[in-house]
Image (tube, grey):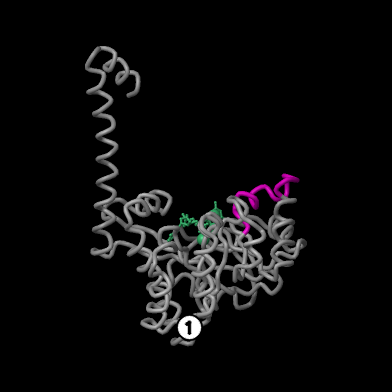
Amino acid sequence: NADTAMYRAKDAGRNNFQFYAHDMNSRALDRLKLESGLRRALERDEFVVHYQPQMEIASGEIIGAEALLRWQAPGQGMIFPGDFISIAEEAGLIVPMGEWVLRTACTQKKAWHDAGMRAPMKIAVNLSARQFKHQDIVKVVSRVLEQTGCRPEWLELEITESVVMDNPEAAARTLQKLSDMGVHLSIDDFGTGYSSLNYLKRFPINSLKIDRSFVRDITTDVDDAAIARAVIALAHSLKMTVIAEGVESAEQLSFLREQQCDQMQGYYLSRPVPAPELEKLLNATSQKSIKPASGD
Ligand code: C2E
Ligand code: MG
Ligand code: MG
Ligand code: MG
């Protein structure tokens, strides 16, 4: 309780320092626990990947799925990336974790292909800044593709603006190598960072993802609507496809359809779900009926 804590701190007088030091230590301890938990999670196989379908708006076809990491720590339920990705990034654990996600997603896509199942054409995998800047990223991607039998054109890598703009020359070389391999590239959370349009035009980027924060009030906020329209126009004039993330309603979808947005992803179509549930959803939508599905 904060009041008691403050009282205790005041009461302790010149021992204030001890109190604050204790507070800091406990936070550092939580962090350390989380870090060692993450370290063990890889060895103990506690991570799972959920898949969120992406739909082509004009046809109603599910054309892709984004792989999203979840952590099932024993006795703690499901932990979402917002609670551990930044710690993993700082601790450098994101590199092996990210490779695990990539391998899992590629293995899944190949399995769907081999089973002759209806499956999304592409699997999108998020790359963190640390992973993208790692000198071996191109080797890692090509090795995983080779080992899993996943074709490069089945894979899309999502990177954020800040990651590519931070060091555009180095990013350009990495992006070119990945693109030459046949892998698709997209800019995630587009509009929330800083982009040099001059670089954007020269990078081998295939698509832009309109950030969820612009989509949320797209039908009521004129500024958000204007931004969404501008991103769609920008993508198309640069010969890129554009996908809106975080679509939760029929109204948002119809706005996006009117504005010629190519693809959508969001709870309105489906939450991220385990692979078997995505298979069910794909079978259910073979008649092009879009119904929200349950998930996490
Ligand atoms: P992101 O890449 O922008 O992924 C989209 C996030 O929005 C996901 O959150 C997804 O569940 C959520 N979302 C999708 N549709 C809707 C919607 O209609 N409404 C709302 N409110 N949310 C929606 P999630 O899975 O919690 O992931 C959060 C972020 O964590 C991701 O944002 C991504 O930046 C990061 N992340 C997730 N998996 C990985 C991974 O394997 N590697 C790395 N490096 N980052 C990851
Ligand atoms: Mg993403
Ligand atoms: Mg995104
Ligand atoms: Mg986002």
- Name the residue nearer the viewer: 93 or 7: 93
In the rendered view, does 1 fall on the left or right side of 249? Answer: left
Q: How many labels does the image show?
A: 1
Judged from this view, the residue extending furthest toward the front is 169
Determine whether 200 is above or below 194 in the image.
below
Q: Where is residue 177 in the image (x, y as percent from the top left)?
A: 50, 75
Q: Position of residue 133 (x, y in %)?
A: 43, 62
Q: Where is residue 135 in the image (x, y as percent from the top left)?
A: 39, 67
- Residue located beneath label 1 in the image: 151
Q: Position of residue 142 (x, y in %)?
A: 42, 78
**First to last magenta residue range:** 210-224
Quarter of the rendering containing residue 96: bottom left
Identity of the residue drawn at 47% across and 84% down:
113
Judged from the image, the secondary structure of the residue bearing numbered disc 1 is: loop
- Residue type, label 1: Arg
Q: Residues within 10 Å of mark 1 (few under 14, many from 20)?
A: some
In the rendered view, does 40 fall on the left or right side of 266? Answer: left
Determine whether 78 is above or below 56 in the image.
above
Quarter of the rendering containing residue 98: bottom left
In the rendered view, does 89 fall on the left or right side of 257? Answer: left
